Image: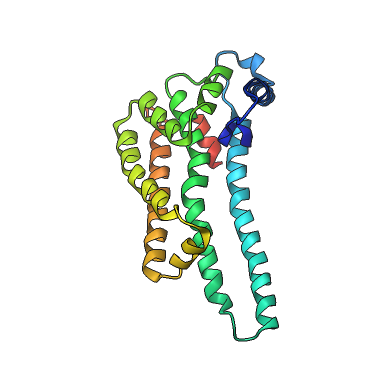
Amino acid sequence: MLLLLESRPVVGDASYARLIDSVIEGYWSVADAHQHDYLPYVFVNDVIRYWRVVLLNQESRLRAKEIELRKAERSAPGTNDVAAQLKVERSARSFKLHFPRATICFASLAYLLAKTRQGLHVSKGDMRAMIALTPFKRLDEAARISGLQSVATTLHAMKPLYEEFLNDSACPKEQLMARFEESEFKRRQRDAGRDFGDKMFVLLRALGTLDDGSVHPLYRSMLV
């Protein structure tokens, strides 16, 4: 599934294409019975599950970091403020979750929602076309395909937030971690991450509501 979300071949284009096709075939294994109305529920479920696993992994890594820091504190008492260091670590990790990881997952879902607003069917060719796009290109295509002004407006507001993330993260890890010790920088990044996530939700909700006011079946499957 990750291969479909965020992969690019460095070498071996032909082998890469065959691998992509084999993964798509797995998700389309029952599509013969739905030649004109196939929706990739299993893929959508896997994307949502992957996102949840990423969140759980963050908590697991923070716990491992806490154990490491407390071990160091026992070896040299008074040299580390464990609570403060954990807050910095959590803020830095959340910073990356709110932007690139969230975009990788939910841009793909946005693309599929947009692609199927007028006809509830996703072909293997549609998936290949999506995979060839970067996450933000998928969002651009979602806005274009859907034709919804609300989606285009929301996406336009999301891009400066992501650009700010790229600018702020374009530095060595040690320098970035040091910046998260600054309360103002930490607050600004927290607010920007929450704002970006809110806008992603607004965008998905707009795509998940069909023209007659009903809920898109793929959008429903993302929630329940």
23 vs 52, nearest the viewer? 23
Q: Residue at horizontal 31%, vertical 39%?
A: 156
119 on left or right of 74: left
The image quarter in which residue 122 lies: top right
Answer above or below: position of 73 versus 110: below
Answer above or below: position of 23 versus 5: above
Kindly tell me whether residue 215 is visible in this rendering.
no
The colour style of the image is: rainbow
Rendered location of residue 50, percent (x, y): 61, 43
Q: Residue at horizontal 51%, vertical 36%?
A: 220
Rendered location of residue 53, percent (x, y): 63, 49
Kindly tell me whether residue 38 is visible in this rendering.
yes
- Number of marks in the rendered image: 0
Q: Residue at horizontal 46%, vertical 34%?
A: 110
Answer above or below: position of 126 versus 205: above
Rendered location of residue 34, percent (x, y): 61, 16
Quadrant of image for the C terminus: top right
200 on left or right of 43: left
207 vs 59, nearest the viewer? 59
Quadrant of image for the N terminus: top right
Rendered location of residue 83, percent (x, y): 55, 76
Q: Residue furthest bottom?
A: 78
